[in-house]
Every structure is written in C-alpha cells, then in structure tokens.
Image (spheres, rainbow, N blue to C red):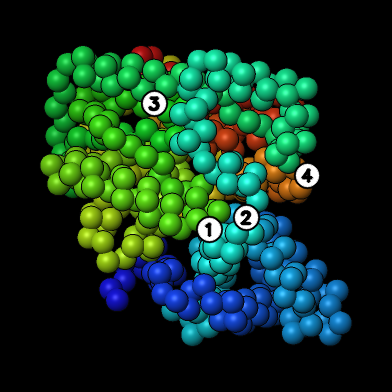
Amino acid sequence: MSEPEVSRREGGLELPTRHPVEWQIPDFGDENSLNAELERVFDICHGCRRCFNLCHTFPTLFDAVDESETGEIDSVPKEAYWDIVDHCYLCDMCFMTKCPYVPPHEWNVDFPHLMLRAKAKQFKSSKTRLRNKLLSATETVGKLAGIPVVRQITNTINESTAGRRLLKGALGVHPEAPLPKYYPSTSQAKLKKSIESGGGFEAEPTDKTKGRLLVFLTCYGKYNQPELLEDLVAILRHNSIPVAIANQEACCGMPKLELGDLDTVEHFKNSNIEELYGWVSDGWDLVAPIPSCVLMFKRELPLLFSEDKRVKAVAEAFFDPFEYLMYRHREGKLNVNFEKSLGKISYQVPCHLRVQNLGLKTKEVLELVPDTTVEAIERCSGHDGTYAVKDEYYEIARKIAGPVVRKVDGSDAEHFSSDCPMAAKMIASLAVSAKGTHPIQLLRYAYGI
C-alpha cells in the first residue's frame, strides 16, 4: 500500500510520519486485536506521562492505572478503556507535539488513530449514543434548522433557559455550553448570486498558488455564520482573486470522524471529492474558513483513502485562508494598503490549525496591518468538536479552557480572536468581557471594505 507523504523536514526537525489508517481490513475491528493494541499503547503512555496536561484522556488513563490492583496496565479492567476513549476528541496534539514514540520510532505509537479505531469499533457495535449521532449530523441539522419556522424554534430553544433545560433532559446537552445560532439556507443562494454578479477578476499565480480560489463553505459557514463567508469573499475580491463556490457540497466529514462513523465519512468524501477534483483539475485552489474542515481535506482524508489519487490532488490544493494569503504576500501579490489599525489582538490558535504545521500564518497576516500586534495563545479552548456541549464533559472542558481564559482576561487587547468560531464562543462564554471576532472579519475591517 502506498503511503501519503506526511513526513517532511521543517526547521531542521523531522516531523512524525503518519501511516494510513487501514480501517477497511478485518483486523481493524477485531475486539481481541484492538484490546491488545490498546493495552500495549496504554502501557507505553503510563510509563511516559508527557501528555498529562493536554486533555482529560491521559489523566483518565493514569488514574485508572494508579488505582488498579497492581498499579500497572495489566490490572486495569477492559471496561475502563472506553472511558479513556470517550475523552479523546482526536485533536492530534499528542501525536504532533508531545509523544516521543511516534513513527518512525520502533514503538510506532499513534494514539489518536488508535482512539479512532476504538471509536469505530464502538460505533459498529451500536454503542454510540443517539445524542452523539445527532450532534455530529451538522449538515442534516443545518438543513433542517434552515427552514424558517424550525429555525425560529431552534434558536429560541438554544437561547432560552427553559429551552436549555429541555435540551439537557432530552439530549444531555449542558445548559451553559455555547450553541451556534442558525441562519436561513437562502444565505448560500445569496452568496452565490453575489459572486456571480461581482464582475471578473484576474490574479497572477505564484509559486504556491494558482490565483483562483474555490471556497468550500463548510456546514458552519452555511448554517451558523454566513457572514464569515461574505467577509472571506470580500477579502479575496479586494485582492483581485477570482472566487467560486461548488455546485454541490456535503459536510467535510470531521464530526463523523470524531464519532468513529467511517462509512459516513466515506459517503461524504465521495460526495465532495469528485466535484472538488474537477475544480482542481481546471486550475483552481481550494480554501475553507474553518480549520477542522481544512484539516479533514489536507490530512485526514488522505490517510483514510491513501490510494485515491483524487483525494491526494484535492489535499495538495487545499489551503487555510491565512496560509494562502501569506503565500501570496511573500511574492508581493497581497494588497497591504490597510485603512484601519487593529491594535492589540489576543489570539487563540485552534488545535486543528496547530497540527497542520503551518506556523502562525494568521498572526503573520494580521501583523501586516499597521499598529497591530497579535499575542498568540497556543492552548486548547476546551470546546473540541462536540465535547464541551455534552453535559457530562462540560465542567472538564471549562477546566481545559482555563489557561486560555485567564490569558484573555489578563490581556489589555482590543480584540479577542480565534480561527475556530466555536472555540471563540467557548472562551468568550467563560471570559469576563471578551467577545470573539474571527480573524477574517478583523482583516476585512482593517481593509475598510
């Protein structure tokens, strides 16, 4: 089996090698094989403990070992393994930043992909809660909530005390967890009409960019924050970059990946890749405003479908928005005539952006604006997909978010920002006075457009 090229050298340090996920072979779902690998990796983690402060997965593991009869992994009951699995939200931070035993080390530890294997086994065994399935159905829920009457009811429930009590009782959604607002599905048609009627643009290609961009709208952009898409399109047009959106778009699949529902991930992949590949073949680059969606196309799908050449081509053409803008700036192709300064920005770097190994491109672009400084906070927001929404995990998520919240509250910044809208909502909900503004919105403001 061929492997995607994920290992490379940056700054003189060799990055971890990521092997494809062989999820379609029979051994992947075999319970005995899975338990043996869980025990092997858990034993290595127990002996190392470098990841104790990343999330709640590792403290859960270490507590299970320390409280066992022998104080070793061999006396931890197999049922306890699933508590550990449930706390993992597949952020990849342990693999990319902490673990000394990842490939090419002979111990070959890939903790997130082992957790994915366990979640896939859990899902196939029908042990996944209905609540978790509903929370991960972002495309379906978004379409339903886009219906006028349904949207009004949904937003009222999400924003009222009585409604939140109802959600807690019915679905186990914590009453204080931030939930997104839903907007009409007509926002997409409005955006497409705006793009088509906006006149022709022509941008020169660079060494890294073709100068034409298809914007992958994302579920969040389509149903929860359509103005973010409008801001991104406005910025690209201000830089004379031709913009398009796909004729057909499904969820990127990240919520279902975190659930372990790999068959649905494949279904979404099949729905998206054919059209995206067509755009790439016609000389277009791809971009999405949500880090998780970019990560899904750039890293996760190539590892799940390593022999699909279309997936590889799409991955190579996919960019984070600020990565794309910085590539163009390096060759003098970015408009840097800003009308307004931004002052000091307190900026939380989402985990799904950090693990892409792009560097701090958002910070670099925003600091092109005169009289603007960006204080980057490279810590987890605690939101983590649907983790913080769940009643049983919300207090843990608050604890995870604590270091970021303290830094935001202790800053004298004019703005608080994060590339992940829900991470920003989580932090803003816990901070004293912070209100999250997406970096794309800040950049548009700086341009004065």
Q: Are marks 4 and 3 in contact (CB under 8 Å)?
A: no
The mark found on residue 229 in the picture is: 3
Q: Residue at x 21, y 19 (%)?
A: 196
The mark found on residue 395 in the picture is: 4
| C-alpha separation, residue under disc 2 versus residue under disc 4 | 21 Å
Q: Which residue is mark 2?
A: 128
Q: Nearer the viewer, mark 2 or mark 3?
A: 2
Q: Secondary structure at mark 4?
A: helix
Looking at the rendering, which quadrant does residue 333 occupy?
top left
Q: Which residue is mark 1?
A: 260
Q: Is residue 250 left or right of residue 346?
A: left
Q: Nearer the viewer, mark 4 or mark 1?
A: 1
Label 1 neighbourhood size at 10 Å, few (<14), some (14-19), many (20+)? many
Q: Is residue 388 above or below residue 354?
A: above
Q: Amino acid at mark 2?
A: Thr
Q: Position of residue 417 (x, y in %)?
A: 55, 31
Sequence-wise first label, 2 or 4: 2
Q: Amino acid at mark 1?
A: Gly
Q: Of residues 136 and 4, which is closer to you in this image?
A: 136
Q: Are marks 4 and 1 in contact (CB under 8 Å)?
A: no
Q: Secondary structure at mark 3?
A: helix
Q: Nearer the viewer, mark 2 or mark 4?
A: 2
Q: Position of residue 401 (x, y in %)?
A: 69, 44
Looking at the rendering, which quadrant does residue 9 occupy?
bottom left
Q: Amino acid at mark 4?
A: Glu
Quarter occupied by the N terminus = bottom left
Q: Secondary structure at mark 1?
A: loop
Q: Is residue 352 left or right of residue 62?
A: left
